[in-house]
Each structure stands twice: as C-alpha cells, then as structure tokens.
C-alpha cells in the first residue's frame, strides 16, 4: 500500500481510505461486530485511513475496529454544525462514541460554496480552538461542489478537502469533471490535502470499477480515495488494485456473484426524472418519492445520471 501526506498537514494516509458509510444503518446495516471485522481486515491490508461522519452512525463500528491500534489509524469525520453549540456537541459525541481523545480530521459536511462556509464559520471557529488544544489535528470540508473547493482556497484554516470526483461526473452539482479536476489541482498546489469520494459514483459505476479507480489513482493531486466497502472480498479487491496488483479470479467471481440492489436515499425530492429515464420501468413515484421495484431493476445505473440530488446508489 502506498502512503502520502495530506497536503501540508503532515498526516500520512494510505491511498485507499475506508469509506464507512456503506457498513452502517443507512446502507448495509451491518452489526458492530461484522462491520468492525471488515474494517480490521482493511487495516491488515495496509489501509490506515478511515472516513466517517456523524450522519453515518458508524462510530461504534470504528471504535471496536481501532481498539489497541488507535495511534496507527487516521480518522476523519464531519458534521453539519453551523454554530459553536452544535460544534461542541458534535465534537464531544465523536470523541465519546469513537472512544478517542482526539480526531485527526474534522470537517464541515457537504459545503456548497463560500456562502455555506461563511454560514458555518462559527462552528469552524470552535473547531479551530479545539485544534489549538490538540483535540483536532486538522480541519476540512466535504463537498459535491466545484465552488466549495475553490472557496476553500480562501481559508488557510481549511487544510483538507474531501470532494466528489469520478470519471462520469456523477454527483457534481455545479460543473463538469474537468471543472472539478481543475479545482482539486488548485487546492493541491495551495497545499491542501485532497481525498476523493464516490470514485464509483455511489456504486453506479461498479461494473467498470478498475477503470474508475485508475482514473482517480492516476491523479497526483488526489492523495487518497475513500471507497465504501461492506465485505471482505471488496476489501481484498480494492487493496490489490490500489497496490497495483492483479486481482485473482476467485475474488472477481465472489464480487460478481454478490447480490446488489438499488437504493434511493431519504433526501429524494420526488422529481420523477429517474422514473422517466428508466427503460425497465423499475422506478415509480410513491408518496412523493422514488421507489424501486427490485425485481425489475437490472442495476444498469443509467437512472443515476438523471438524479440532480445524487440520491441513487447501488449497494
């Protein structure tokens, strides 16, 4: 496994980051025991970096996984706090539920522009004070927006960016793939740490996973890539790819045989674009939101390109 510093932070991370959203109650719903076992296997394969968030509800899985090795693992979390009171609550919750006395990277979750960063700046100020006390090592933002990556350049206190980027541009809310790549390059040149999310487009591009991974791994401005993993086969497959090694046919067969499903996230606005685009007629609006007929769905992923809210995932 290759390791790189996250920009000027001096935090060394593996190129493969364990994205913990997939193991939690919002997706695979794995138990703490099973989820922590999969995380530990990733650590055994050389991964030393894990991404989570208050929203994901995976702190307990990570707490179990890092027992006895906390100092060797970089934990990045994020929250939606916009004032000091909310920031204090989120930080205390993270420390308690993760069973740690410090957080490596604490980020403002889903920033969209300079306006949203300014709107959350009181929370950021609280985190800056926590950093001065050694409770947080570095501060960052996560985003689906090119504008937020560019805005982060104006804030020296924002040291890490966690942007969405994949070869098809799925989930980028305000620009093209090239726009995002240029913004990430500017951030990297400015010394910001950059670790990408959604290289597989929320699972919608999983059939071309090798090509999708190559796209982000080959980019020198991206220091690490967070990938959701929910079983041991996925951990081994991804660790081998990131190490530049061939994946055995047995692992490929295990992944190909895994039964997957289409997931519509809870923030669906019910616009109906996905239903109109579905050639299988597997999606329909029910009670104002998109609903999937799993028996009709062929997991082609085409519908995801029509979802402006990036609600559609393959898990």
Image: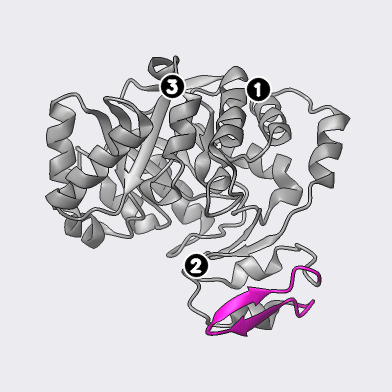
Residue at the spot 43% in from the left edge and 16% down from the top edge:
72
Q: What is the magenta range?
A: 279-295
Residue closest to the eye, 89 or 159 = 89
Q: Which quadrant of the figure has residue 93?
A: top left
Q: Is residue 285 magenta?
A: yes
Dot 2: element: loop
Q: Earlier in the sequence, mark 2 or mark 1?
A: 1
Determine whether, in the image, residue 314 is placed left or right of residue 307: right
Q: Give percent across and percent down for residue 286.
A: 60, 83
Badge 2 density bin: few <14, some 14–19, many ≥20, Cα 10 Å: few
Q: Give percent across and percent down for residue 124.
A: 18, 45
Q: CA distance from mark 2 to mark 3?
A: 31 Å
Q: Which residue is mark 3?
A: 73
Badge 1 density bin: few <14, some 14–19, many ≥20, Cα 10 Å: some
Q: Give percent across and percent down for residue 153.
A: 26, 44
Residue at the spot 55% in from the left edge and 24% down from the top edge:
47
Up/down of 140 relative to 277, above or below: above
Foreground mark, 2 or 1, reads 2
Q: Which residue is mark 2?
A: 266
Q: CA distance from mark 3 to mark 1?
A: 19 Å
Q: Earlier in the sequence, mark 3 or mark 1?
A: 3
Q: Which residue is mark 1?
A: 243
Q: Which quadrant of the figure has residue 131?
A: top left
Q: Earlier in the sequence, mark 2 or mark 3?
A: 3
Q: CA distance from mark 2 to mark 1?
A: 35 Å
Dot 1: element: loop
Residue closest to the eye, 100 or 9 = 100
Dot 3: element: loop
Q: Quadrant of the N terminus?
A: top right
Q: Is residue 207 visible?
A: yes
Residue at the spot 58% in from the left edge and 49% down from the top edge:
29
């Amino acid at each position: 496994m290759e390791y790189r510093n996250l920009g000027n932070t001096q935090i060394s991370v593996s190129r493969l980051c364990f994205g913990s959203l997939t193991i939690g109650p919002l997706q695979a719903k794995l138990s703490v025991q099973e989820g922590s076992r999969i995380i530990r296997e990733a650590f055994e394969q050389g991964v030393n970096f894990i991404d989570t968030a208050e929203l994901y509800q995976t702190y307990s899985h990570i707490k179990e996984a890092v027992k006895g090795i906390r100092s060797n693992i970089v934990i990045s979390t994020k929250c939606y706090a916009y004032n000091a009171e909310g920031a204090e609550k989120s930080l205390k919750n993270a420390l308690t539920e993760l069973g740690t006395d410090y957080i490596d990277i604490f980020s403002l979750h889903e920033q969209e522009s300079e306006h949203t960063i300014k709107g959350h700046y009181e929370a950021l100020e609280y985190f800056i004070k926590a950093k001065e006390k050694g409770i947080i090592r570095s501060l960052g933002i996560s985003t689906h927006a090119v504008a937020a990556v560019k805005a982060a350049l104006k804030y020296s206190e924002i040291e890490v960016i966690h942007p969405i980027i994949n070869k098809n541009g799925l989930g980028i809310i305000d620009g093209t793939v090239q726009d995002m790549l240029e913004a990430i390059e500017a951030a990297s040149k400015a010394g910001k740490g950059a670790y990408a999310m959604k290289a597989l487009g929320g699972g919608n591009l999983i059939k071309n996973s090798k090509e999708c991974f190559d796209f982000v791994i080959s980019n020198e401005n991206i220091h690490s890539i967070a990938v959701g993993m929910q079983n041991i086969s996925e951990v081994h497959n991804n660790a081998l790819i990131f190490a530049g090694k061939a994946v055995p046919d047995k692992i490929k067969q295990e992944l190909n045989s895994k039964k997957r499903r289409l997931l519509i996230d809870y923030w669906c606005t019910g616009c109906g674009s996905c239903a109109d685009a579905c050639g299988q007629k597997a999606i329909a609006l029910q009670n104002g939101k998109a609903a999937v007929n799993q028996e009709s769905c062929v997991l082609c992923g085409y519908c995801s390109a029509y979802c402006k809210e990036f609600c559609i995932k393959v898990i």
